[in-house]
Image (cartoon, rainbow, N blue to C red):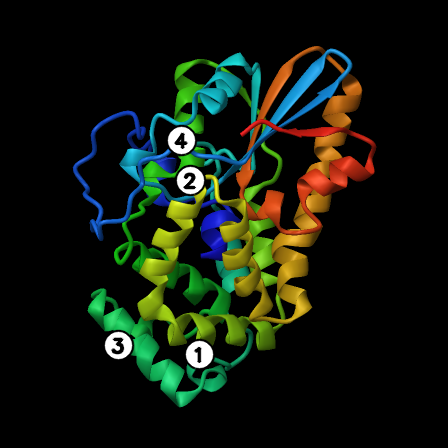
Amino acid sequence: MLFAAGCSSNDNDAEQGSESPLQETEEETSGTGQDYEGDGGLLWKVVHGETTMYVQGTIHLGHEDFYPLAPEIEKAYESSDVVLPEINMFEAEVNEEEINEMALFEGDTNLDDVLSEEAYAKLSDLFEENEMAIENYEDFEPWFIGMLLGEFSHKESDLAPEYGVDLYFLQRSLEDNKEIVELETIELQYDVLSGNSMKTQVEMLESTLENFEETGSSLDELGYDWIHGDKDGLVDQLSEGFGSFDEEYQLGLNDNRNINMANKLDEILQRDDGQTYFVIIGSAHVVIEPSVLSELEKDGYEIERVY
């Protein structure tokens, strides 16, 4: 759930140019009856001199009923000259060798050594249900296995990556020939996930396994809160997720990244080049303190909630 509103996804569909949410897709969502017809929310505006910057909190999964979004959001995008995502999923290239260096255990340690017997057994069952063999992933650290479980959880939710809000705007940006400037890199996001201590990684994975049956409904609730602009609901969900682990987890996944992104946005605003910018970042980065917005406020900017 935190990944859905925090780190961007770079799955193969995005790399190969998946269909826009504006287009039809053959894959259907599970359909649990949740109401996803709404306008979308979490849009802010910052003005400095002749430069305007819109900051749109997103989720990296979505539903076909999300679109089109609120007129205010659509107009903000349309007025923009430059789109600023966390990463450009259409151009991010993953170096398999580098990922293996980060994801593989050192020495003779493996998953069976660090997970509880109960957690390992449940993980093995989940892999088997998804026609994968746990034996092929014994040498991978818990953070990487957690990413695989994220892929499994999509199948249990109404939401799907091909309807992700970031993907929606990135696809349109390509079609509209807008300039796209990344705020982060895919390597940085992998560094964040792999940089947690083994203790934190194990806690994250075992918590995911323990609550896996509820993951689909949690994602559905996240999508519902987002499309209906329920900021408090999003804060409650995401704060609960961060609160499950020690400070190291939130510091790496959210706090440090928010400060870095806010610094980059500050640099752009200070250039005051007269352009309009449309920032698309996971909702965790605009609702969990210290947020990108609160960091910009510290720098003296006035933040206006548009929607």
Q: Which mark's residue is nearer the viewer, 3 or 2?
A: 2
- Note whether residue 302 is visible: yes
- Residue 80, x across and y down, in percent: 55, 16
* Residue type for callout 3: Asp
Q: Classify 96 as above or below 60.
A: below
Image quadrant where residue 304 sits? top right
Q: Which mark's residue is nearer the viewer, 4 or 3?
A: 4
- Residue 12, x across and y down, in percent: 34, 43
Residue beneath the point at 51% across and 51% down: 234
Q: Earlier in the sequence, mark 1 or mark 4?
A: 4
User: Real-space Cα distance between discs 3 and 2?
Assistant: 36 Å
Mark 4: which secondary structure? Answer: loop
Q: Earlier in the sequence, mark 1 or mark 2?
A: 1
Badge 1 is on which residue? 111
* Residue type for callout 4: Asp
Badge 4 is on which residue? 39
Badge 2 is on which residue? 228
